[in-house]
Image (spheres, rainbow, N blue to C red):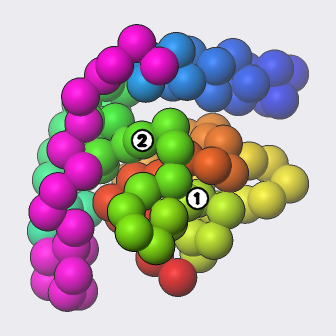
Amino acid sequence: MQNEQENALRARIAEMLAQGLVTQTEPFPETDREFGSLLTELRHQDPDDLQAKLVLSGFTDKPYGPDQMRCQECMYYLVHRKWCDLPELAVPVEPNWWCRLWRI
Ligand code: SF4
């Protein structure tokens, strides 16, 4: 059941991104302080507002930047569940996606 719900949510996010949702990919948080500020902003959002979460975290449905960063190599990515384990996000993702909370 959990898998079905997560697959459905992943498909919904994919559709929102494919339809051209503009997200805030920059600035990338280079320091711990900037990263922490972004997490604080995420924590203050309505947890049920999926679109706001995607926008603020800068989601893309493709690898990003010259280094082609993607969820697959991020420390928060759970391979077998295809899941972002960062508590402030906690959403199903695809390995080829990216967001600016990316960490290695
Ligand atoms: S933090 Fe961002 S890049 Fe990392 S797994 Fe989650 S959604 Fe993907």
| Type of amino acid under label 1 | Cys
List the residue tagged with mark 2. 60
Question: In the rendered structure, which segment of residues is drawn in magenta?
Answer: 18-35
Specify the quadrant that holds the N terminus.
top right
State how many labels appear.
2
Q: Is residue 7 above or below residue 33?
A: above
Q: Ligand 1: does it lie within 8 Å of the C-beta at label 1?
A: yes
Element at label 2: loop
Q: Is residue 37 left or right of residue 88?
A: left
Residue 66 image point, x, y percent: 39, 69
Where disc 1 sits, the SS reads helix
Mark 1 is surrounded, within 10 Å at the Cα level, by few (under 14), some (14 to 19) or many (20 or more) other residues, namely many
- Percent x, y of residue 63: 51, 53
Q: Amino acid at mark 2?
A: Thr
Residue 34 versus residue 58: which sits nearer the camera? 58
- For label 1, the residue is 71
User: What secondary structure characterizes most of the magenta part?
Assistant: loop
Position of residue 9 relative to residue 81, above or below, is above
Residue in the image at 46% along x and 73% along y: 67
